[in-house]
Amino acid sequence: MSPRQKSTASLTGIDDILLGSVGAAIPPSESLDNALRLFGTWSGTDKLMMTVQYAAKLLIPLLQLRAEVQHRAGRRLKPQSPTSEGLFKLASQLSLARRVSGLWGVLAIIKALSALERSQPPSRAKLTLKRLQGLSMLIYYPLEYVSFFSSPFAPLLAGVSPSMSAKAQLWSIRAWGVFVALQILLFGQDWKSMSRPEREGDNSADGKAQDIATLKKRKVQSSVVGGIYKNELYTNILSFVSAVAALKGGWEASRLSPNP
């Protein structure tokens, strides 16, 4: 080997060590591939953001309680936790991000309604229930975002009064409640057909179950004026459990399909 070839080989070895060491140290990973499939979708990202959002909300009172105890013990100057304040801001930003990113969910509903009319549901009852679900979502989404974009968080619709905004929110939540009720009926249909040797051939029920988990707890507590739960802690606990279940379900689904 000539001196020039030795020099080139030496530079190549140095290049491999300096620039290629990071990639070489990372082995192929099915978990990494699965995470990319899941979090590369709107649904997967929403599930992750919801989990972090409600985990932060559950940590806030614990950190605040710790700060108050330390203050009474003379170990802290003020009975406030800067970390809890930061988590509160993070949860608020994630909530807004989820609301804005969910705007395009209506496109999925339109596509689903179109596909439904070109498919062959196993029964007339299921076809009717799914049609009603799609129509309830077509009511839900416009009213939901009229309410959101006329709220103090995103006051873009200046012509919508606070009372109109509140009514839009109330009826959007009722439309969502109709969707949930119809989904329960669909689950009943699936339960009846469990003994059949051949099921529907798709995972629509499982997917919708996860979608309910991501949104139901956010909406149900406000489905009547004044809300169901007086204590926000209960809502946050239920929402966190739902978020974890949705994230777990999405993770399992992404292992079976490239489009969870």
Image (spheres, grey):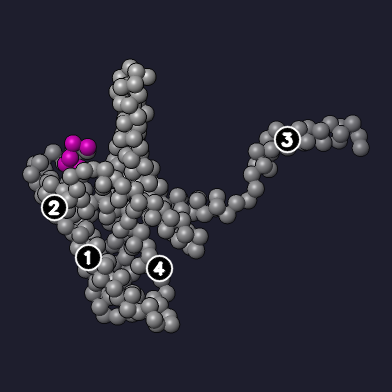
User: Does 24 appear above or below 44?
Assistant: above
Kindly indicate the quadrant of the structure image that contains residue 93.
top left
Res 110 quadrant in image: bottom left
Task: Report crowding for label 1: few under 14, some 14 to 19, many 20 or more residues within 10 A (C-alpha).
Answer: some
The 10 Å Cα crowd at callout 3, few under 14, some 14 to 19, many 20 or more, is few
Q: Position of residue 94 (x, y in %)?
A: 33, 40
Q: Earlier in the sequence, mark 1 or mark 4?
A: 1
Disc 4 target residue: 203
Count of marks placed on residues = 4
Q: CA distance from mark 2 to mark 1?
A: 16 Å
Indicate which label's residue lies in the foreground, 3 or 4.
4
> What quarter of the picture does the C terminus occupy?
bottom left
Please name the amino acid that badge 4 sits on.
Answer: Asn
> Quadrant location of the N terminus?
top right
Compute the Cα span from label 3 to label 2.
63 Å
Residue hosting label 2:
224
User: What residue is pinned by disc 3?
Assistant: 17
Residue 51 can be seen, yes or no: yes
217 shown above or below 20 = below
Going by the image, does 133 lie left or right of 165? right
The magenta span reads 149-153
Kindly report the distance in space between the C-alpha atoms of the residues bearing marks 4 and 2.
32 Å
Residue that badge 1 annotates: 181
Q: Earlier in the sequence, mark 3 or mark 4?
A: 3
**Amino acid type shown at disc 2:** Val
Secondary element type, mark 1: helix
The front one of 189 and 160 is 189
